[in-house]
Amino acid sequence: MMETSRPTVYIETYGCQMNVSDSELMLGKLAASGYTPVDVPDGADVILVNTCAIRDHAEQRVIGRLGELKRHMTATSIMGVTGCMAQRLGPQLLEKAKHVSLVVGPDGYRTLPAMVDSARNGQRTIATTFDMEEHYEDFTPRRFDKVKAWIPVQRGCDYRCTYCIVPTTRGSERSRQLPDVVREVEGVVSEGMTEVVLLGQTVNSYNDGTHDFADLLRAVGAVRGIRRVRYTSPHPNDFSDRVIRAMAEVPTVCEHVHLPMQSGSTKTLKRMLRRYTREGYAECVQKLRAAIPGLSITTDIIVGFPGETDADFEETLSAVRELGFADAFMFIFSPRDGTPATRMPEELTVPQDVAAERMARLVETVRAGARALNLTQLGQRREVLVEREAKRGEAMVLARSRDFRSVLVPGDATLLGQYLTVELTGTTGSTFTGQIVSERAALPLAG
Protein backbone atom coordinates (compact mmCIF):
# COMPACT_ATOMS: atom_id res chain seq x y z
CA MET A 1 0.00 0.00 0.00
CA MET A 2 1.27 3.45 -0.85
CA GLU A 3 2.72 5.62 1.91
CA THR A 4 0.45 8.56 2.67
CA SER A 5 -0.72 10.62 5.60
CA ARG A 6 -4.17 10.81 4.06
CA PRO A 7 -6.71 8.06 4.84
CA THR A 8 -7.03 5.46 2.09
CA VAL A 9 -10.05 3.95 0.34
CA TYR A 10 -10.35 0.74 -1.67
CA ILE A 11 -13.43 -0.03 -3.80
CA GLU A 12 -14.20 -3.42 -5.35
CA THR A 13 -16.88 -3.35 -8.05
CA TYR A 14 -19.28 -6.06 -9.21
CA GLY A 15 -21.94 -5.99 -11.92
CA CYS A 16 -22.76 -3.68 -14.78
CA GLN A 17 -21.13 -0.59 -16.23
CA MET A 18 -23.50 1.58 -14.18
CA ASN A 19 -21.88 0.12 -11.07
CA VAL A 20 -18.44 0.93 -12.47
CA SER A 21 -19.60 4.51 -13.01
CA ASP A 22 -21.03 4.66 -9.48
CA SER A 23 -17.70 3.45 -8.07
CA GLU A 24 -15.98 6.27 -9.96
CA LEU A 25 -18.41 8.74 -8.39
CA MET A 26 -17.78 7.36 -4.90
CA LEU A 27 -14.02 7.49 -5.35
CA GLY A 28 -14.29 11.05 -6.60
CA LYS A 29 -16.42 12.10 -3.64
CA LEU A 30 -14.09 10.49 -1.10
CA ALA A 31 -11.00 11.87 -2.85
CA ALA A 32 -12.53 15.35 -2.59
CA SER A 33 -12.98 14.68 1.13
CA GLY A 34 -9.33 13.87 1.67
CA TYR A 35 -9.07 10.16 0.88
CA THR A 36 -6.44 8.55 -1.33
CA PRO A 37 -7.69 5.71 -3.57
CA VAL A 38 -5.60 2.52 -3.43
CA ASP A 39 -5.55 -0.55 -5.65
CA VAL A 40 -5.40 -3.24 -2.95
CA PRO A 41 -7.48 -3.71 0.22
CA ASP A 42 -4.56 -4.48 2.57
CA GLY A 43 -4.87 -2.10 5.51
CA ALA A 44 -7.11 0.40 3.70
CA ASP A 45 -8.90 2.78 6.05
CA VAL A 46 -12.14 2.33 4.10
CA ILE A 47 -13.06 -0.80 2.13
CA LEU A 48 -16.20 -0.60 -0.02
CA VAL A 49 -17.78 -3.42 -2.01
CA ASN A 50 -20.05 -2.03 -4.74
CA THR A 51 -22.56 -4.75 -5.52
CA CYS A 52 -24.95 -6.19 -8.08
CA ALA A 53 -28.34 -7.82 -7.37
CA ILE A 54 -29.27 -9.10 -10.83
CA ARG A 55 -28.63 -12.78 -10.05
CA ASP A 56 -28.48 -14.78 -6.84
CA HIS A 57 -25.01 -16.07 -7.75
CA ALA A 58 -23.67 -12.51 -7.72
CA GLU A 59 -25.03 -11.89 -4.24
CA GLN A 60 -23.64 -15.15 -2.84
CA ARG A 61 -20.26 -14.29 -4.32
CA VAL A 62 -20.30 -10.92 -2.57
CA ILE A 63 -21.26 -12.44 0.81
CA GLY A 64 -18.26 -14.75 0.48
CA ARG A 65 -16.02 -11.90 -0.57
CA LEU A 66 -17.02 -9.80 2.46
CA GLY A 67 -15.69 -12.58 4.65
CA GLU A 68 -12.44 -12.74 2.70
CA LEU A 69 -11.91 -8.98 2.88
CA LYS A 70 -12.22 -9.00 6.67
CA ARG A 71 -8.65 -10.26 6.96
CA HIS A 72 -7.39 -7.14 5.14
CA MET A 73 -8.91 -4.80 7.74
CA THR A 74 -6.99 -3.12 10.52
CA ALA A 75 -8.48 -2.37 13.93
CA THR A 76 -9.71 0.99 12.61
CA SER A 77 -10.76 0.02 9.07
CA ILE A 78 -14.35 0.70 7.99
CA MET A 79 -16.13 -1.82 5.74
CA GLY A 80 -19.14 -0.82 3.65
CA VAL A 81 -21.47 -2.44 1.11
CA THR A 82 -22.88 -0.16 -1.60
CA GLY A 83 -24.98 -0.52 -4.73
CA CYS A 84 -27.95 -2.67 -5.72
CA MET A 85 -27.45 -5.53 -3.26
CA ALA A 86 -27.17 -2.97 -0.45
CA GLN A 87 -30.43 -1.39 -1.62
CA ARG A 88 -32.18 -4.76 -1.79
CA LEU A 89 -31.03 -6.31 1.49
CA GLY A 90 -30.49 -3.24 3.69
CA PRO A 91 -30.32 -4.25 7.38
CA GLN A 92 -29.94 -7.94 6.52
CA LEU A 93 -26.37 -7.20 5.46
CA LEU A 94 -25.53 -5.78 8.87
CA GLU A 95 -26.85 -9.00 10.38
CA LYS A 96 -24.99 -11.29 7.99
CA ALA A 97 -21.65 -9.46 8.25
CA LYS A 98 -20.98 -7.97 11.67
CA HIS A 99 -17.79 -6.27 10.43
CA VAL A 100 -19.81 -4.19 7.93
CA SER A 101 -20.60 -0.67 9.18
CA LEU A 102 -22.20 0.95 6.12
CA VAL A 103 -24.98 -0.16 3.78
CA VAL A 104 -25.53 2.43 1.05
CA GLY A 105 -27.88 2.25 -1.95
CA PRO A 106 -27.27 3.91 -5.35
CA ASP A 107 -28.88 7.22 -4.30
CA GLY A 108 -26.98 7.54 -1.01
CA TYR A 109 -23.42 8.33 -2.05
CA ARG A 110 -23.61 12.07 -1.34
CA THR A 111 -23.33 11.53 2.42
CA LEU A 112 -20.72 8.77 2.18
CA PRO A 113 -17.88 10.74 3.86
CA ALA A 114 -20.16 11.69 6.77
CA MET A 115 -21.31 8.08 7.14
CA VAL A 116 -17.69 6.90 7.28
CA ASP A 117 -17.03 9.44 10.04
CA SER A 118 -20.04 8.16 11.97
CA ALA A 119 -18.81 4.59 11.56
CA ARG A 120 -15.50 5.58 13.15
CA ASN A 121 -17.54 6.57 16.18
CA GLY A 122 -19.19 3.16 16.29
CA GLN A 123 -22.41 4.03 14.45
CA ARG A 124 -23.58 1.53 11.84
CA THR A 125 -25.52 3.28 9.07
CA ILE A 126 -28.04 2.35 6.37
CA ALA A 127 -28.88 4.77 3.54
CA THR A 128 -31.33 3.23 1.08
CA THR A 129 -33.84 6.02 0.44
CA PHE A 130 -34.50 6.80 -3.23
CA ASP A 131 -33.87 10.38 -4.36
CA MET A 132 -35.57 11.14 -7.67
CA GLU A 133 -33.52 14.33 -8.08
CA GLU A 134 -30.10 12.77 -7.50
CA HIS A 135 -27.73 12.71 -10.48
CA TYR A 136 -24.51 13.64 -8.63
CA GLU A 137 -23.94 16.59 -10.98
CA ASP A 138 -21.45 18.25 -8.62
CA PHE A 139 -19.32 15.09 -8.23
CA THR A 140 -16.02 14.74 -10.08
CA PRO A 141 -15.60 11.05 -10.94
CA ARG A 142 -12.22 9.37 -10.36
CA ARG A 143 -12.17 7.33 -13.56
CA PHE A 144 -10.65 3.84 -13.72
CA ASP A 145 -10.43 3.72 -17.51
CA LYS A 146 -8.13 6.20 -19.24
CA VAL A 147 -9.27 5.29 -22.77
CA LYS A 148 -13.07 5.59 -22.63
CA ALA A 149 -15.48 7.18 -20.18
CA TRP A 150 -18.72 5.73 -18.78
CA ILE A 151 -21.29 8.53 -18.55
CA PRO A 152 -24.65 7.89 -16.83
CA VAL A 153 -27.46 9.78 -18.55
CA GLN A 154 -30.42 8.05 -16.91
CA ARG A 155 -31.01 6.26 -13.61
CA GLY A 156 -33.75 3.80 -12.67
CA CYS A 157 -36.32 2.04 -14.85
CA ASP A 158 -40.07 2.32 -15.50
CA TYR A 159 -40.37 -1.04 -17.25
CA ARG A 160 -41.45 -3.87 -14.99
CA CYS A 161 -40.02 -7.01 -16.55
CA THR A 162 -41.14 -9.87 -14.32
CA TYR A 163 -37.63 -11.26 -13.76
CA CYS A 164 -35.87 -7.96 -13.05
CA ILE A 165 -34.91 -6.46 -9.67
CA VAL A 166 -33.65 -3.13 -11.09
CA PRO A 167 -36.82 -1.08 -10.39
CA THR A 168 -36.52 -2.22 -6.76
CA THR A 169 -32.81 -1.46 -6.45
CA ARG A 170 -32.55 1.71 -8.57
CA GLY A 171 -36.03 3.19 -8.47
CA SER A 172 -38.06 4.88 -11.19
CA GLU A 173 -36.58 6.28 -14.37
CA ARG A 174 -35.17 9.80 -14.40
CA SER A 175 -32.89 11.50 -16.92
CA ARG A 176 -30.10 14.05 -16.54
CA GLN A 177 -30.41 17.42 -18.25
CA LEU A 178 -28.79 17.37 -21.69
CA PRO A 179 -26.48 20.37 -21.02
CA ASP A 180 -25.11 18.60 -17.91
CA VAL A 181 -24.27 15.50 -19.95
CA VAL A 182 -22.58 17.59 -22.64
CA ARG A 183 -20.57 19.42 -19.98
CA GLU A 184 -19.32 16.10 -18.58
CA VAL A 185 -18.38 14.90 -22.08
CA GLU A 186 -16.42 18.10 -22.66
CA GLY A 187 -14.58 17.40 -19.40
CA VAL A 188 -13.76 13.91 -20.59
CA VAL A 189 -12.17 15.35 -23.74
CA SER A 190 -10.08 17.70 -21.60
CA GLU A 191 -8.76 14.59 -19.80
CA GLY A 192 -7.58 13.19 -23.14
CA MET A 193 -10.30 10.61 -23.86
CA THR A 194 -12.07 10.39 -27.20
CA GLU A 195 -14.70 7.67 -26.58
CA VAL A 196 -17.75 7.88 -24.33
CA VAL A 197 -20.34 5.27 -23.40
CA LEU A 198 -23.75 6.67 -22.42
CA LEU A 199 -25.38 4.60 -19.68
CA GLY A 200 -28.99 3.97 -18.71
CA GLN A 201 -31.19 1.05 -17.73
CA THR A 202 -33.22 1.70 -20.90
CA VAL A 203 -30.96 4.37 -22.27
CA ASN A 204 -32.85 5.13 -25.49
CA SER A 205 -35.94 6.14 -23.50
CA TYR A 206 -33.88 9.11 -22.23
CA ASN A 207 -35.95 12.29 -21.94
CA ASP A 208 -35.05 15.32 -19.82
CA GLY A 209 -38.40 17.01 -20.42
CA THR A 210 -37.13 18.92 -23.42
CA HIS A 211 -34.76 16.59 -25.26
CA ASP A 212 -35.00 12.91 -26.24
CA PHE A 213 -32.28 10.37 -26.92
CA ALA A 214 -31.92 11.47 -30.54
CA ASP A 215 -31.13 14.99 -29.33
CA LEU A 216 -28.64 13.59 -26.83
CA LEU A 217 -26.81 11.53 -29.47
CA ARG A 218 -26.53 14.57 -31.74
CA ALA A 219 -25.32 16.85 -28.93
CA VAL A 220 -22.76 14.42 -27.51
CA GLY A 221 -21.61 13.34 -30.96
CA ALA A 222 -20.90 16.98 -31.88
CA VAL A 223 -18.61 17.68 -28.90
CA ARG A 224 -15.26 18.72 -30.31
CA GLY A 225 -12.67 16.03 -29.67
CA ILE A 226 -15.10 13.11 -29.33
CA ARG A 227 -14.42 10.40 -31.85
CA ARG A 228 -16.66 7.54 -30.70
CA VAL A 229 -20.07 7.50 -29.01
CA ARG A 230 -21.55 4.25 -27.68
CA TYR A 231 -24.47 3.54 -25.37
CA THR A 232 -25.98 0.71 -23.33
CA SER A 233 -28.50 -0.77 -22.83
CA PRO A 234 -31.44 0.20 -25.04
CA HIS A 235 -34.93 -1.30 -25.08
CA PRO A 236 -36.35 -2.48 -28.44
CA ASN A 237 -39.55 -0.50 -27.90
CA ASP A 238 -37.73 2.83 -27.59
CA PHE A 239 -35.99 2.96 -30.98
CA SER A 240 -38.00 5.76 -32.52
CA ASP A 241 -37.40 6.82 -36.12
CA ARG A 242 -35.75 9.97 -34.68
CA VAL A 243 -33.25 7.91 -32.69
CA ILE A 244 -32.44 5.66 -35.66
CA ARG A 245 -31.92 8.69 -37.91
CA ALA A 246 -29.58 10.24 -35.36
CA MET A 247 -27.56 7.03 -35.19
CA ALA A 248 -27.30 6.96 -38.97
CA GLU A 249 -26.48 10.64 -39.40
CA VAL A 250 -24.04 11.33 -36.56
CA PRO A 251 -20.58 10.16 -37.72
CA THR A 252 -19.25 9.65 -34.19
CA VAL A 253 -22.01 7.18 -33.17
CA CYS A 254 -20.54 3.69 -33.52
CA GLU A 255 -22.00 0.94 -35.68
CA HIS A 256 -22.92 -1.32 -32.78
CA VAL A 257 -26.05 -1.85 -30.70
CA HIS A 258 -26.36 -4.13 -27.68
CA LEU A 259 -30.06 -4.97 -27.98
CA PRO A 260 -31.40 -7.36 -25.29
CA MET A 261 -33.76 -9.95 -26.80
CA GLN A 262 -34.10 -12.21 -23.70
CA SER A 263 -36.12 -14.84 -25.62
CA GLY A 264 -37.12 -15.68 -29.17
CA SER A 265 -40.53 -16.94 -28.06
CA THR A 266 -43.44 -14.50 -28.02
CA LYS A 267 -45.16 -16.54 -25.30
CA THR A 268 -42.08 -16.35 -23.08
CA LEU A 269 -41.62 -12.65 -23.81
CA LYS A 270 -45.21 -12.06 -22.68
CA ARG A 271 -44.56 -13.84 -19.37
CA MET A 272 -41.40 -11.75 -19.01
CA LEU A 273 -43.50 -8.60 -19.66
CA ARG A 274 -40.98 -7.43 -22.25
CA ARG A 275 -43.76 -5.63 -24.18
CA TYR A 276 -42.72 -6.77 -27.64
CA THR A 277 -43.14 -9.93 -29.71
CA ARG A 278 -40.55 -12.00 -31.53
CA GLU A 279 -41.70 -10.31 -34.73
CA GLY A 280 -41.49 -6.86 -33.15
CA TYR A 281 -37.92 -7.46 -32.04
CA ALA A 282 -36.95 -8.72 -35.51
CA GLU A 283 -38.56 -5.65 -37.09
CA CYS A 284 -36.49 -3.40 -34.83
CA VAL A 285 -33.31 -5.22 -35.89
CA GLN A 286 -34.25 -4.87 -39.56
CA LYS A 287 -34.92 -1.11 -39.24
CA LEU A 288 -31.60 -0.57 -37.51
CA ARG A 289 -29.66 -2.55 -40.11
CA ALA A 290 -31.43 -0.86 -43.01
CA ALA A 291 -30.44 2.56 -41.67
CA ILE A 292 -26.89 1.76 -40.53
CA PRO A 293 -24.72 -0.26 -42.94
CA GLY A 294 -22.36 -2.68 -41.24
CA LEU A 295 -24.23 -2.53 -37.93
CA SER A 296 -23.14 -5.17 -35.42
CA ILE A 297 -25.76 -6.39 -32.94
CA THR A 298 -25.11 -8.16 -29.65
CA THR A 299 -27.77 -9.26 -27.19
CA ASP A 300 -28.83 -10.75 -23.85
CA ILE A 301 -30.71 -14.07 -23.62
CA ILE A 302 -32.27 -15.86 -20.63
CA VAL A 303 -32.93 -19.61 -20.72
CA GLY A 304 -35.10 -21.60 -18.35
CA PHE A 305 -37.60 -18.81 -17.62
CA PRO A 306 -40.71 -20.22 -15.89
CA GLY A 307 -43.00 -21.85 -18.42
CA GLU A 308 -40.37 -22.08 -21.18
CA THR A 309 -41.16 -25.21 -23.16
CA ASP A 310 -38.94 -27.13 -25.56
CA ALA A 311 -40.81 -25.40 -28.40
CA ASP A 312 -40.23 -21.97 -26.84
CA PHE A 313 -36.52 -22.69 -26.53
CA GLU A 314 -36.33 -23.87 -30.14
CA GLU A 315 -37.81 -20.50 -31.12
CA THR A 316 -34.96 -18.79 -29.28
CA LEU A 317 -32.41 -20.90 -31.16
CA SER A 318 -34.06 -20.12 -34.50
CA ALA A 319 -34.11 -16.40 -33.68
CA VAL A 320 -30.37 -16.52 -32.92
CA ARG A 321 -29.73 -18.19 -36.29
CA GLU A 322 -31.96 -15.79 -38.21
CA LEU A 323 -30.83 -12.52 -36.64
CA GLY A 324 -27.07 -13.07 -36.85
CA PHE A 325 -25.86 -11.74 -33.51
CA ALA A 326 -22.18 -10.93 -33.25
CA ASP A 327 -22.20 -12.17 -29.64
CA ALA A 328 -24.51 -12.62 -26.66
CA PHE A 329 -24.53 -12.57 -22.88
CA MET A 330 -26.42 -15.73 -21.89
CA PHE A 331 -27.90 -16.57 -18.50
CA ILE A 332 -29.89 -19.32 -16.82
CA PHE A 333 -32.92 -17.75 -15.15
CA SER A 334 -32.25 -16.80 -11.54
CA PRO A 335 -35.30 -15.91 -9.41
CA ARG A 336 -34.95 -12.71 -7.39
CA ASP A 337 -37.00 -12.15 -4.25
CA GLY A 338 -39.59 -9.45 -4.78
CA THR A 339 -39.97 -9.91 -8.53
CA PRO A 340 -43.24 -11.19 -10.07
CA ALA A 341 -41.46 -14.19 -11.59
CA THR A 342 -41.06 -15.70 -8.11
CA ARG A 343 -44.86 -15.76 -7.74
CA MET A 344 -45.48 -17.78 -10.90
CA PRO A 345 -47.00 -21.26 -10.37
CA GLU A 346 -44.45 -23.83 -9.25
CA GLU A 347 -45.38 -26.16 -12.08
CA LEU A 348 -43.92 -23.60 -14.52
CA THR A 349 -40.44 -23.99 -13.02
CA VAL A 350 -37.91 -25.37 -15.51
CA PRO A 351 -35.72 -28.07 -13.89
CA GLN A 352 -32.08 -27.06 -13.48
CA ASP A 353 -30.77 -29.95 -15.56
CA VAL A 354 -33.09 -28.98 -18.42
CA ALA A 355 -32.07 -25.33 -18.17
CA ALA A 356 -28.37 -26.31 -18.13
CA GLU A 357 -28.78 -28.46 -21.23
CA ARG A 358 -30.58 -25.63 -23.03
CA MET A 359 -27.85 -23.22 -21.99
CA ALA A 360 -25.16 -25.46 -23.49
CA ARG A 361 -27.07 -25.65 -26.79
CA LEU A 362 -27.63 -21.91 -26.83
CA VAL A 363 -23.96 -21.16 -26.21
CA GLU A 364 -22.93 -23.44 -29.06
CA THR A 365 -25.51 -21.89 -31.40
CA VAL A 366 -24.45 -18.33 -30.59
CA ARG A 367 -20.76 -19.17 -30.92
CA ALA A 368 -21.24 -21.02 -34.19
CA GLY A 369 -23.10 -18.07 -35.66
CA ALA A 370 -20.49 -15.58 -34.44
CA ARG A 371 -17.66 -17.74 -35.76
CA ALA A 372 -19.26 -17.99 -39.21
CA LEU A 373 -19.85 -14.23 -39.27
CA ASN A 374 -16.29 -13.48 -38.20
CA LEU A 375 -14.78 -15.73 -40.85
CA THR A 376 -16.42 -13.59 -43.55
CA GLN A 377 -14.51 -10.56 -42.23
CA LEU A 378 -10.97 -11.94 -42.38
CA GLY A 379 -8.76 -9.80 -44.61
CA GLN A 380 -10.82 -6.67 -43.96
CA ARG A 381 -9.29 -3.55 -42.47
CA ARG A 382 -10.65 -1.83 -39.37
CA GLU A 383 -9.90 1.27 -37.38
CA VAL A 384 -9.38 0.15 -33.78
CA LEU A 385 -8.85 1.93 -30.49
CA VAL A 386 -6.30 0.26 -28.20
CA GLU A 387 -7.98 -0.25 -24.80
CA ARG A 388 -5.55 -2.27 -22.68
CA GLU A 389 -2.72 -4.74 -22.62
CA ALA A 390 -3.82 -8.29 -23.35
CA LYS A 391 -4.36 -10.58 -20.38
CA ARG A 392 -2.74 -13.49 -22.12
CA GLY A 393 0.25 -13.66 -24.40
CA GLU A 394 3.27 -11.42 -24.54
CA ALA A 395 3.59 -8.07 -26.29
CA MET A 396 -0.07 -7.94 -27.32
CA VAL A 397 -2.75 -5.32 -26.78
CA LEU A 398 -6.54 -5.56 -26.97
CA ALA A 399 -8.18 -3.08 -29.30
CA ARG A 400 -11.79 -2.46 -30.26
CA SER A 401 -13.29 -1.64 -33.65
CA ARG A 402 -16.19 0.77 -34.11
CA ASP A 403 -18.51 -2.23 -34.55
CA PHE A 404 -17.31 -3.62 -31.18
CA ARG A 405 -15.02 -6.37 -32.45
CA SER A 406 -12.18 -7.27 -30.10
CA VAL A 407 -8.84 -7.44 -31.92
CA LEU A 408 -5.53 -8.64 -30.48
CA VAL A 409 -2.58 -6.90 -32.12
CA PRO A 410 1.16 -6.84 -31.42
CA GLY A 411 2.16 -3.97 -29.16
CA ASP A 412 2.67 -2.72 -25.63
CA ALA A 413 1.38 -0.09 -23.21
CA THR A 414 2.73 2.75 -25.35
CA LEU A 415 -0.17 2.12 -27.76
CA LEU A 416 -2.95 2.58 -25.15
CA GLY A 417 -5.49 5.16 -26.26
CA GLN A 418 -4.17 5.19 -29.82
CA TYR A 419 -6.19 4.62 -32.99
CA LEU A 420 -4.67 2.12 -35.43
CA THR A 421 -5.69 0.66 -38.74
CA VAL A 422 -5.39 -3.13 -38.63
CA GLU A 423 -6.00 -6.00 -41.00
CA LEU A 424 -8.01 -8.88 -39.52
CA THR A 425 -5.85 -11.98 -39.90
CA GLY A 426 -7.53 -14.62 -37.75
CA THR A 427 -10.37 -15.33 -35.35
CA THR A 428 -11.03 -17.61 -32.39
CA GLY A 429 -14.76 -17.12 -32.86
CA SER A 430 -15.11 -14.27 -30.40
CA THR A 431 -11.83 -12.36 -30.77
CA PHE A 432 -9.84 -11.42 -33.86
CA THR A 433 -6.12 -11.26 -34.33
CA GLY A 434 -4.82 -8.45 -36.48
CA GLN A 435 -1.72 -6.89 -37.96
CA ILE A 436 -1.13 -3.16 -37.78
CA VAL A 437 -1.34 -1.50 -41.19
CA SER A 438 -0.75 2.06 -39.98
CA GLU A 439 0.51 3.28 -36.63
CA ARG A 440 -1.22 5.94 -34.58
CA ALA A 441 -3.96 6.95 -36.98
CA ALA A 442 -4.61 10.66 -37.14
CA LEU A 443 -7.08 12.08 -34.63
CA PRO A 444 -9.38 14.48 -36.50
CA LEU A 445 -11.56 16.40 -34.08
CA ALA A 446 -15.33 16.28 -34.28
CA GLY A 447 -17.33 19.43 -34.74
Image (tube, rainbow, N blue to C red):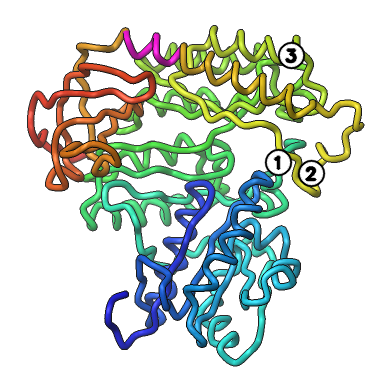
Specify few, some or many for label 2: CA neighbours under 10 Å numbering under 14, 14-19, or 20 or more: some
- Where's residue 395, x and y in %? 15, 39
Give the percent coordinates (x, y) of residue 79.
55, 75
Q: Which residue occupies the foreground of this view, 412 or 231?
A: 412
Vertical side of 201 occupied by 362: above or below? above
Within 10 Å of the Cα at label 3, are there few (<14), some (14-19), or many (20+) other Cα atoms? some
Residue annotated with mark 1: 164
Q: Is residue 238 above or below residue 364?
A: below
Would residue 280 be counted in the magenta stretch? no
For the N terminus, the quadrant is: bottom left
Instruction: Tell me, yes or no, whether the two marked residues, 1 and 2, touch with CB atoms within 8 Å.
Output: yes
Give the number of the disc on residue 339.
2
Label located before the other in sequence (1 or 2): 1
Of badges 3 and 2, the one in the foreground is 3
Residue at mark 3 to residue at mark 2: CA–CA distance: 22 Å
Q: Which residue is drawn at 77% across and 36% down?
A: 162
Check disc 3 and report the residue beneath it. Answer: 312
Instruction: Give the magenta range.
Output: 369-375
Residue 373 located within the stretch drawn in magenta:
yes
Where residue 124 sits, quadrant-wise, is: bottom right
Q: Which of marks 1 and 3 is nearer the N terminus?
A: 1
Measured in 3D between alpha carbons, the distance from the residue under mark 1 to the one under mark 2, in whole angstroms, is 6 Å
